[in-house]
Image: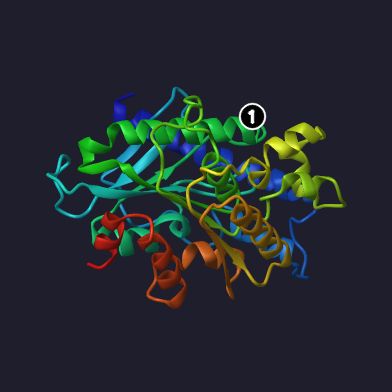
Amino acid sequence: MDEGMATSAVNSFGIHRRRFLAQVLFATLGLAGGASASPLLDRLRERRWPAGQASVSGAQPSLANVAYGADPAQMYDVYLPRGAPLAAPSPRAPVIFMVHGGAWAVGDKAMTRVVEAKVARWVTKGFVLVSVNYRMLPEVPPDGQLRDVALALGHAQAQAENWGADPKQFILMGHSAGAHLVALLAQAEPTDLALRGPSVLGTVALDSAAMDVEAIMSHPHLRLYDLPFGKSPSYWRAMSPVHQLRRASPPVLAVCSTRREDACVQARAFVARATQLGVQAQSLGVDLSHGEINAQLGLDNDYTGSVEAFMATLSPAVAQHLAH
């Protein structure tokens, strides 16, 4: 089998594995079908991959399946500005480091909702976009996923200059479970080299309802959270971004769907705690569904404008690129 066939086989295996895990997740929750629509059902349908329409983005990465670890899931894609050399002169490009969601169990870095509009909007403005895969449930719990994302970040920062990008100009971005992971990663102490390389400019957390896992698990909750977070109160707290906040945390924008009461309650509580610590933080409630918050970021709309207004505060280089 040649290298191209081997890569295709690995990718095909990954697709079928994710389909299977999505089916297991739905069956476990008793949500495989039914005519009635609930907010949970809507959110899980949006996470399911593939979902009746083209799930893989038409945007083609400049560098595909860059390995940052030994596991086939430990890969990321890199989208470079059109015509940009891999080692551009100064000023180097800022980087959006994107982590997909999917209930910590499904999803993929190449999904349309993860990259399509973001690439079209920001890569054309001179940003580099990195979209990350990581190991998932049931094999790897959220703390292991956090370390995967941290490993990917460190690897990407080490490679950034080879892409014409600046390793000190990274913005973390994630959706749903990915938002939970990047919100946690942003709280890592600079000395914790196991969790993070050079510092990041800030974090855009897209519609996570798990900013306080301890509060979720301490009260009646959706069974969705039982598999990732288990029964240990100390683990709940360790996996709660709100309880890991520190005074030196980078700025954060917590986007939430106003159609999901739990997400905005958690976003506002996170921002309130961050503000108490002197961290630059704000929440942004938008009248979009959980999936639309991911898919429509990058389109020419007020929502994208609000996110860009936050991004522009992170550094002069980011503001300069957004002005293009």
Residue 276 vertical position relative to residue 25 in the rendered view, above or below: below
Q: Residues within 10 Å of mark 1 (few under 14, many from 20)?
A: few
Q: Nearer the viewer, residue 89 or 189?
A: 189
Whole-percent x and y of residue 61? 30, 47
Residue to which mark 1 is pinned? 139
Work out whether residue 166 or residue 58 is closer to the camera in this orientation and state it: 166
Amino acid at circle 1: Glu
Q: Is residue 28 visible?
A: no
Taking depth in this image into account, of 100 and 17 the one nearest to the observer is 100
Element on which disc 1 rests = loop
Q: Position of residue 197 (x, y in %)?
A: 41, 31
Quarter of the rendering containing residue 2: top left
Give the quarter of the figure containing the N terminus.
top left
- Viewer-proximal residue among 135 and 248: 248
**Residue positioned most to the right:** 220
Q: Is residue 222 above or below residue 197?
A: below
Horizontally, residue 252 falls left or right of residue 236, namely: left
